Amino acid sequence: MKKQFAVIGLGRFGGSICRTLSEQGAEVLAVDIDEERVNEFTPIATHAVIADSTDESVLKSLGLRNFDHVIVAIGDNIHASILTTLILKELGVKKVTAKAQNDYHEKVLRKIGADFVIHPERDMGVRIANNITSTSVLDYLELSDKHSIVEVIAGKKMDGKTLSDLDVRANYGVNIVAIKEHGYINVSPRADQTVHEGDILIIIGSDPDIDRFKKQMLDNE
Ligand code: ADP
């Protein structure tokens, strides 16, 4: 059976989640208090309804407890976001992802049982700052507040060395999980694989270990 998703709040963030899930062929119920927003999503989502998500009886009648994953993407109205998340968890929704506006909001959402809390502006800010401060880092994904995955370009210091020569796990505590070379990606590189200048390495580790690796192993860091 197809997974069922519901997106509550169809602003820029919720709207883009709703659009992408629909494009991927998922069943999506789109909910917003604002009629115009709902009309915009009627041709996109499986169902689109005008409703106030802070009203428990409305969420019950929509059958939200049977959905696999509900995304609470209410923006500025922190009160409505908290109340909606609380009701959804009380109804027994297994997975609730909620968007937080600030650290305090995030803390409350976690306390009342949100399974995932996202902070899109802050997370994107961190990601972009990490990308623009480094010429060798191509991309950056925060896994937790202490761990990340980074995509870096191998430079002269690594050129011609095998993964076992580099031994980054012992030396820096990070793992090279994939190597991209001439458009081809090897997702389980062996110890005898040679790294060439210009290869793209995908590295996972704790942030301090990744920093040490970047400073010592990459050019221009
Ligand atoms: P973004 O920053 O993602 O653009 P917005 O604040 O523009 O966020 O969008 C949040 C959406 O949530 C709006 O479309 C708003 O109508 C909707 N919303 C706010 N409160 C409720 C509520 N109680 N029930 C349902 N939808 C709500």
Image (tube, grey):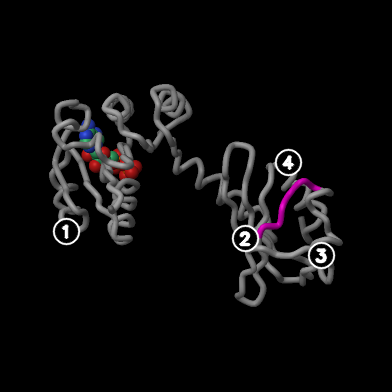
- The furthest residue to the front: 1
Mark 3 vs 2, N-terminal side: 2
Instruction: Check whether the beta carbons of the residues at disc 4 and disc 1 lie within 8 A of each other.
Output: no
User: In this picture, is 86 found above or below 32?
Assistant: above
Q: Name the disc covering residue 204, or none.
A: none
Instruction: Check whether the beta carbons of the residues at disc 3 and disc 2 lie within 8 A of each other.
Output: no
Which quarter of the figure has residue 31? top left
Instruction: Check whether the beta carbons of the residues at disc 3 and disc 1 lie within 8 A of each other.
Output: no
Instruction: Check whether the beta carbons of the residues at disc 2 and disc 1 lie within 8 A of each other.
Output: no
User: In this picture, is 92 found above or below 160?
Assistant: above
Mark 4 vs 1, N-terminal side: 1
Q: Which residue is mark 2?
A: 138
Mark 2–mark 4 Cα distance, whole angstroms, equals 18 Å
Query: Residue 27, how many percent across, how many down?
Result: 25, 52
Report if residue 135 is visible in the image: no
Q: Which residue is mark 4?
A: 208
Q: Secondary structure at mark 1?
A: loop
Mark 3–mark 2 Cα distance, whole angstroms, equals 17 Å
Q: Which residues are magenta?
A: 172-177
Query: Residue 67, how many percent across, how many down?
Result: 27, 41
Which image quarter holds the C terminus?
bottom right
In the displayed structure image, the side of residue 173 where residue 207 appears, left or right? left
Mark 3–mark 4 Cα distance, whole angstroms, equals 20 Å
Mark 2–mark 1 Cα distance, whole angstroms, equals 37 Å
Mark 4–mark 1 Cα distance, whole angstroms, equals 47 Å
In the displayed structure image, the side of residue 217 where residue 103 appears, left or right? left
